[in-house]
Amino acid sequence: MKVTIVGAGAMGCVFGARLASAGATVRFVDVNEAHIEAINQNGLECALDEGRFTLPLTASTASNAHGQSDLIIVFTKSAHTEAAIASVKHLIGDETYVLTLQNGLGAVEKIAHYAPRTRILHGVTTVPAELLGPGKVESKGKGKTQFYAVTGAPAVLSAIEQLFNKAGLETVADEDIEEAIWTKVIFNASMNATCALLDTTPGPLGDTQAGRDLAGTLVEEGAAVAHAVGVNVDASSVHAMTNMSMTQHRNHQPSMLQDLMAGRQTEIDDINGAIMRAGKEAGVETPVNETIYRLIKIREAL
Ligand code: NAD
């Protein structure tokens, strides 16, 4: 399978490295020149659970990538999805599928400007990844990937499922994908944004009753919106996830906290912002998500 990874950061590199090791023909497309040059000159240096190794892979900017792909995986941060997919529209042929496993809601709508919905796949992943520097990626610990087609059930689902599992990425083609996507976005709206705003990690947040109440209210608001748009999210399982995060991942720095600390734009528009907008359309009030959204927007601008 010819696979193009658009957004060859932490996640893109881990998925790309694993898929290449499983026999896929992988190329990376990114905008980071130093990272592109490092991959092309020295290969992609990987530190995975099974050990350290370097893969001779290639990377380029979109304008230097040619030839259509069987599968394009979009792995930018959500704010860059539209620009990224627009830049690779020449790589999308009549039989190309486009997969997004990014956090947040709304990537499908952006991708749908450039590929028919019948060839868009979406999902979620808990695979952990960190970019250590140009051309260097680390992933420690297991994760699970769930995905499905936006419409229909094309044969490509099982081909991708098999390839990903062969690559060591535990993956399931899951018909209830909307539920999985909303469950993750509600969890992120509750924990990521709150930790980012308060400059803390899940442990100290959960050590206070106020922190637990705030996280809980965000979950309830998100679940009410999900139900209003017809997605059957089980709020109690999201509460269990936030509780586990507060007790077992006490010192984990959520990506939104890392983004604010590094002065980068966060994914707030597609997390709390997306829940807020969906709530408005469905007639469900989301005052706490809206407040958190505004506070993060102010932090981004400071
Ligand atoms: P990242 O910042 O490490 O990588 C994003 C990459 O996209 C960067 O290399 C950047 O240069 C590139 N990019 C930006 N604009 C582009 C454009 N126009 N065209 C092509 N490339 C462009 O981010 P990440 O941590 O890999 O996260 C990617 C997505 O996966 C996010 O939605 C994130 O929330 C989600 N996610 C991350 C993790 C994790 O552990 N890192 C886990 C689960 C989900």
Image (cartoon, rainbow, N blue to C red):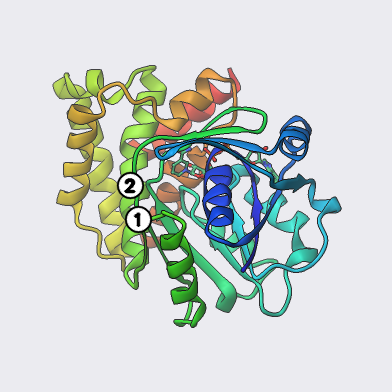
Rendering coords of residue 229 (x, y %):
35, 65
User: Can residue 281 be seen by looking at this rendering?
Assistant: no
User: Can residue 102 be seen by looking at this rendering?
Assistant: yes
The label shown at residue 33 is: none
Q: Is mark 2 within 8 Å of ligand 1?
A: no
Q: Is residue 288 above or below residue 163?
A: above
How packed mark 2 is, by other alpha carbons closer than 10 Å (few <14, some 14-19, many 20 or more), is many
The quarter of the image that holds ligand 1 is top right
Q: Is residue 230 above or below residue 87?
A: below
Quarter of the view holding residue 288? top left
181 or 71, nearer to the observer: 71
Residue type at the position of mark 1:
Trp
The label shown at residue 186 is: 2
Residue type at the position of mark 2:
Ile
Residue tagged 1: 182
Q: Is residue 222 left or right of residue 35?
A: left
Residue at the (31%, 37%) spot, across then down: 190
